[in-house]
Amino acid sequence: MEPRSAYKSVWTALSTTNKQAITYVIGDVDAAAIYEAAQQTKHWLNVSVGIRPNDVVLEIGCGIGRVGQVLAPLCKQWIGCDVSPNMLKHAQERLAAFDNVRFVEISGYDLRPIEDASIDLVYCTVVFMHLDEWERYNYILEAWRVLRPGGRIFIDNFNLCS
């Protein structure tokens, strides 16, 4: 069994089919539940950091593109980053109707493919719980690196102790 920190191989193995990817991202749910969960994230982004029409928005750990589907219509460009090429494939299928989306495969430890000071909003939703402490810290540092001056960041997570 691979260690949990082998993010790329673990998440790629967990997402060979779209149904499998959905199950590991959000559970055994239907399209309406996926959409409703995305709407909730959009709400919290709007009330905390805002989503502006001219924003370049980057999601760390985009998975199946659940949130990107509701954010892409609201921003200039939406960039989905994920460690799993399978997840990115599923996200591309979900967001095929949008011409302002881009997908970037990342290492699982940083945002290296993303240019310095090129992003207005970085967000990450329910991903950090899967990462070791130092990887979470490094993603925060990387978010600051890719953010433009005045850029915003939003990170949420489950309380694993509750």
Image: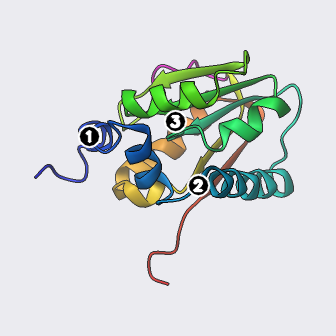
Q: Examine the rendering and report whether any part of residue 111 can be seen.
A: no
Amino acid carrying label 3: it is Glu
- Residue 81 vs residue 96: left or right? left
**Residue located at (32% from left, 36% from top):** 16
Residue 8 spot, x, y in % from top left: 30, 36
Residue designated by label 2: 30
For the stretch drawn in magenta, what is the main secondary structure?
loop
**Residue located at (51% from left, 74% from top):** 159
Membership of 116 in magenta stretch: yes
- Residue 15 vs residue 72: left or right? left
Tag in front: 3 or 2: 2
For residue 61, above or below residue 146: below
| Distance (Cα) linking label 3 and label 2 | 34 Å
Amino acid carrying label 1: it is Ala
Residue designated by label 1: 13
Residue 130 spot, x, y in % from top left: 38, 56
Membership of 70 in magenta stretch: no
Tag in front: 3 or 1: 1
Q: Is there CB contact under 8 Å for labels 3 and 1?
A: no
Residue designated by label 3: 142
Amino acid carrying label 2: it is Asp
Residue 131 spot, x, y in % from top left: 37, 54
In this rendered view, identify the residue nearer to me: 143 or 39. 39
Which stretch is magenta? Answer: 112-117
**Residue located at (37% from left, 37% from top):** 17
Q: How many marks?
A: 3
Q: Which of the two labelled residues, at mark 3 and mark 1, occupies the earlier sequence position?
A: 1
| Distance (Cα) linking label 3 and label 1 | 26 Å
Label 3 Cα neighbours within 10 Å, binned few <14 / some 14-19 / many ≥20:
some
Residue 124 spot, x, y in % from top left: 58, 47
Of the numbered discs in the image, which one, if any, rests on residue 84?
none
Residue 96, picture quadrant? top right
